[in-house]
Amino acid sequence: MSVELTNFNTELLARKGTTPIRETADGVVEKIWAARDGSVITMPWLLAMAMEGRVFNCSLASTATKMTGAVDYGATHPGICMVIPTGSTMIPVHLDVHCQDAAGTDTSIVVMVDSGDLYASGGTAVAAVTNLRTDSPYASVVTKKYASDSAITITDPGIGETILYTYENAFADATTSPPMILDWNPMPPPVLVGPATFLVYTYATTTAVEFGFSIQWVELPSNSIV
């Protein structure tokens, strides 16, 4: 009788799905990080993504710059439109929108996602996407990043969109009402498997709202997670 010996470490690393082993930007496949007693050491997922260089930021070019939203809701005219292409996945983890408004105007912010590339035309290209890891080991592949200083036009999402968040604020008096600030940190976050579109609608009942924003998201090749 013969006994076949197997290297346990080799066997373990070869099994797909045993642990989320990932290749680094310089092509190194890291081993499991564990204490001497064998217990696996972990860190928060979002921190791990940032350390790997997979978290990105997008905002207006200057804090003094403001975009202009719409008067009344229009399904084909969002205030912010971002498109993730086929083969990549976007996971929004933070959005802040700061609005200015006129007295007596009800203002709304609605966050939506939809499958497919809905962008048609218009809007103002926002500042270049930056990596939250300053040496930028990966570049974002988000193809379209627009805000609505001029009206964005998209394909009507119809019933395909998913409404994730709705915020409404009634301004009683422009001199006494506080600024309207949306701070959205979704849990669980949406997972936009490309092609897909991330949409933010900013609109008011009588006077178009001016707004600034920033958004952070995790971006990964789709074959890494789906």
Image (spheres, helix red, strand yellow):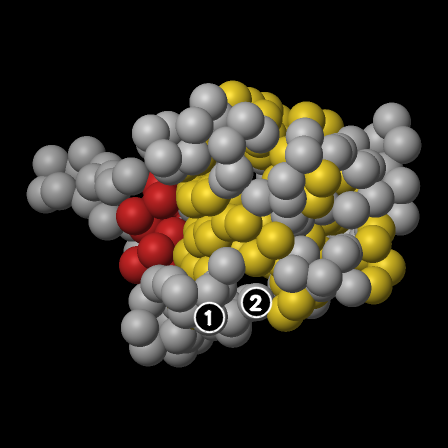
Q: Position of residue 105 (x, y in %)?
A: 58, 29
Three-letter amino acid code of the residue under disc 2:
Val
Q: Residue at x 78, y 46 (%)?
A: 77
Q: Are marks 2 and 1 in contact (CB under 8 Å)?
A: yes
Q: Splitting the image into 4 quarters, where does residue 37 fall? A: top left
Is residue 162 depicted above or below 40 in this figure? above
Q: Position of residue 189 (x, y in %)?
A: 52, 33
Is any atom of residue 214 visible in this view?
A: yes
In this view of the protein, which residue sits in the foreground, 29 or 117?
Answer: 117
On screen, residue 176 versus residue 113, left or right, reads: left
On screen, residue 50 versus residue 130, left or right, reads: left
For label 2, the SS is loop
Is residue 124 depicted above or below 185 in this figure? below
Looking at marks 2 and 1 on the same chain, the residue that comes earlier in the sequence is marked by 1
State the separation of the CA atoms marked 2 and 1.
6 Å
User: Which residue is denoted by mark 2 in the rendering?
Assistant: 126
Is any atom of residue 226 visible in this view?
A: no
Q: Residue at x 38, y 63 (%)?
A: 63
Three-letter amino acid code of the residue under disc 1:
Ala
Q: Splitting the image into 4 quarters, where does residue 157 fall? A: top right
In this view of the protein, which residue sits in the foreground, 52 or 110?
Answer: 110
Q: Residue at x 58, y 44 (%)?
A: 209
Q: Position of residue 160 (x, y in %)?
A: 84, 31
The crowd level at tag 1 (other Cα within 10 Å; few <14, some 14-19, many 20+) is few
In this view of the protein, which residue sits in the foreground, 222 or 3?
Answer: 222
Is residue 106 depicted above or below 156 in this figure? above
Looking at the image, the residue that sits furthest to the left is 36
Q: Position of residue 205 (x, y in %)?
A: 68, 30
For label 1, the SS is loop
Disc number at residue 61?
1
- The quarter of the rendered structure image containing the C terminus is top right
On screen, residue 138 versus residue 226, left or right, reads: left
